[in-house]
């Protein structure tokens, strides 16, 4: 049962193989097994690759089976269309395009499996890239908010400087009227005279202005600090919104690119392995000598070709015979028609001569 299934996978004529030796059947069973297991590996590879895309196991399995059947059909077609010939050059010519197709299939099959085999290393590369992308993303988002925040901070600093300048002015006026009262500066008279009162009033007015300025600027500073807090909150919100995009940066293309950043030698050997598996049936038929099955297949095709040529020749002969018969029939009909017209003409001439002779005899009698 299993042997017959593998023979079916080989694409060979089962009727002819049943008449061949057991060794010949085993050879084609081995070719069919290679075709089957290549398709099985293609199914697994495709299902894994599609799982990284759809993130749904049922969808991945469904399309993976379809892909495996496609690869199975292609491999079976490649193997079944290779025919042994007495000329190795002819065999090479017919094998070359099939080898190219087999190489393409080997690449398609091996790449998803490489992604699975080197999954840990690829995850490490992706983690490094995600971290760098996170830093770059934060820097880019900060560049959108930083100018506005710096501008507001500058305004806050300016408001604080106004208060500081006013405080220095008030402190200076305070020192002035205290020094006047102590007689250290100004009039240098000890006591609180008119000059002291004038300087004290000036200080009190500046102090009132300072208190008012502090109240106004404090309110302004609080508003601007609230604006900065809102901007920072929006910045963090935008970082939070964009982070899932970075976190999900592990699709098929990202993994393939990450794989290309690893050492190429292991991937190359895996590709060679699948290339050997994919091309094994082709090389098996190419290097093997012309065997019993090939002779029987050639004989069967020759019989079919001869029979078709005979049928074509018979149809051409029948057609030519019909043409000849038709030509002869119509030629005979044409000859008979000409003979009929000639006899009719002679009869008319004879009747005319008889009538003329009768009319002439009547004239003589009268």
Image: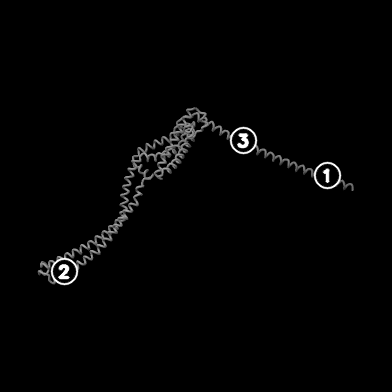
Residue 93 visible = no
What distance separates the C-alpha of mark 3 from that of mark 2? Answer: 139 Å
Name the quadrant containing residue 325: top right
Above or below, comparing residue 362 to residue 161 in the picture = above
What distance separates the C-alpha of mark 1 from that of mark 2? Answer: 178 Å
What distance separates the C-alpha of mark 1 from that of mark 3? Answer: 60 Å
Q: Nearer the viewer, residue 284 or 259?
A: 259
Image position of 33 (left or right of 217): right
Which residue, given by chain and number where applicable, does mark 1 sit on? 354
Name the quadrant containing residue 307: top right
Where's residue 172, x and y in %?
A: 16, 65
Image position of 118 (left or right of 327): left
- Viewer-nearest of labels 1 and 2? 2
For this orientation, the residue located farthest to the bottom is: 194
Which residue, given by chain and number where applicable, does mark 3 sit on? 314
Where's residue 338, x and y in %?
A: 73, 42
The numbered mark at residue 200 is 2
Q: Nearer the viewer, residue 226 or 280?
A: 226
Element under disc 2: helix
Nearer-N-terminus badge (1/2): 2
Where's residue 287, x and y in %?
A: 45, 31
- Viewer-nearest of labels 3 and 2? 2
């Amino acid at each position: 049962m299993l042997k017959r299934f593998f023979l079916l996978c080989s694409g060979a004529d089962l009727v002819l193989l049943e008449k061949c030796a057991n060794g010949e059947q085993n050879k084609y069973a081995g070719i069919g097994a290679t075709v089957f297991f290549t398709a099985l590996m293609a199914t697994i590879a495709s299902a894994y690759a599609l799982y990284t895309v759809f993130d749904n196991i049922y969808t991945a399995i469904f399309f993976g089976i379809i892909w495996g059947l496609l690869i199975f059909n292609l491999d079976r077609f490649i193997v079944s269309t290779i025919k042994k010939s007495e000329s190795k050059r002819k065999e090479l010519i017919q094998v070359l395009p099939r080898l190219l197709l087999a190489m393409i299939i080997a690449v398609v099959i091996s790449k998803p499996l490489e992604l699975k085999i080197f999954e840990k290393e690829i995850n490490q590369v992706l983690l490094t890239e995600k971290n760098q992308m996170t830093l770059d993303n934060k820097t880019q988002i900060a560049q959108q908010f930083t100018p506005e925040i710096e501008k507001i901070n500058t305004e806050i600093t300016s408001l604080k400087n106004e208060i500081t300048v006013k405080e220095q002015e008030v402190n200076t006026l305070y020192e002035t009227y205290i020094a006047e009262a102590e007689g250290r500066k100004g009039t240098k008279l000890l006591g609180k005279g008119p000059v002291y009162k004038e300087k004290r009033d000036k200080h009190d007015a500046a102090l009132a202005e300072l208190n008012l300025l502090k109240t106004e600027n404090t309110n302004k500073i609080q508003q601007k600090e609230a604006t900065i807090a809102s901007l920072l909150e929006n910045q963090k919100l935008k970082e939070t919104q964009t982070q899932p995009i970075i976190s999900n940066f592990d699709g098929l293309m990202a993994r393939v690119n990450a794989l290309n950043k690893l050492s190429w030698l292991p991937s190359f050997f895996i590709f060679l392995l699948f290339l050997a598996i994919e091309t094994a049936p082709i090389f098996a038929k190419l290097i093997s000598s012309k065997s019993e099955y090939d002779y029987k297949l050639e004989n069967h095709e020759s019989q079919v070709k001869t029979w078709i040529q005979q049928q074509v020749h018979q149809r051409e002969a029948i057609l030519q015979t019909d043409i000849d018969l038709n030509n002869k029939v119509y030629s005979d009909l044409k000859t008979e028609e000409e003979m009929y017209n000639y006899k009719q003409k002679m009869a008319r001439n004879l009747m005319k001569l008889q009538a003329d002779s009768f009319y002439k005899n009547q004239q003589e009698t009268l």
